[in-house]
Amino acid sequence: MTLKEKLQSKLKGAGKVTVLGVGSQLRADDAAGMLVASYLQKSCKKYPQAENLQILFGETAPENLTGEIKAFKPTHLIIVDAADTGKRAGTALIMEPGELAGISFCTHQLPMNILTDYLLKSFKCEIIIVGIQPKTLVFGKSVSRSVKAAAKEISATIKSIILTSARGVLA
């Protein structure tokens, strides 16, 4: 199953969607999640009915946004971050919150599994974690072409699914 097919399946019946970009823009490909959020925010600006889509920039402390997420009460939460899955740079995978133990997420103050556990206990929603394999995490370096391309593709995929979904978060 492709990434798009998996996301379509996970977002079926979505009412309100929060996209939480995570990562450090100072450490090359660790900015992957932040790029997805940025691309998505720019491409969805022209849709006045976007009140059912919340885009947040969690940077290296996404736990600081749990109050905003809970107040929005999304039916679906998409967390996007760089994750070392041992795959080729730019490869994106969808992970379940329970699968996070063996995955290395890059630069967080709070481990991703603790964040997702807290959110799942705080309110009911579907959590979708998209991990993008980084090429480099060197401080001060630019984001690699493969991760930039993956971030653009993921943001376009999320936008496409949301715009054409049956309930139409943005439609």
Image (cartoon, rainbow, N blue to C red):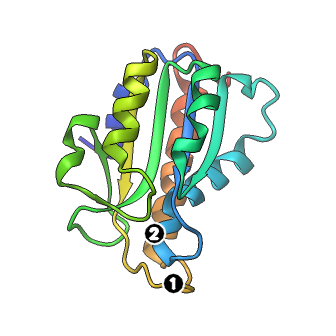
Locate residue 132, reporting x and y percent.
38, 59
Query: Residue at (64%, 30%) from the top-left corner?
Result: 68
**Image quadrant containing the C terminus:** top right
**Nearest to the observer: residue 46 or residue 38:** 38
Give the mark nearest the N terminus, 1 or 2: 1
Circle 2: element type: helix
Q: In this view, does 79 lie to the left or right of 50?
A: left
Q: Is residue 76 left or right of residue 96?
A: right
- Camera sees residue 23: yes
Circle 1: element type: loop
Residue 139 — which label?
Answer: 1
Classify 125 as above or below 136: above
Locate residue 146, reporting x and y percent.
43, 73
Amino acid type shown at disc 1: Phe
Query: Residue at (70%, 46%) from the top-left corner?
Result: 41
Locate residue 48, reporting x and y percent.
82, 28
User: Mark 1, residues whose alpha carbon is within 10 Å: few (<14), some, or many (≥20)?
Assistant: few
Classify 14 as above or below 94: above
The residue carrying mark 2 is 147
Distance from Cα at disc 1 to Cα at disc 2: 16 Å
**Nearest to the observer: residue 157 or residue 15:** 15
Residue 11 — which label?
Answer: none
Amino acid type shown at disc 2: Val
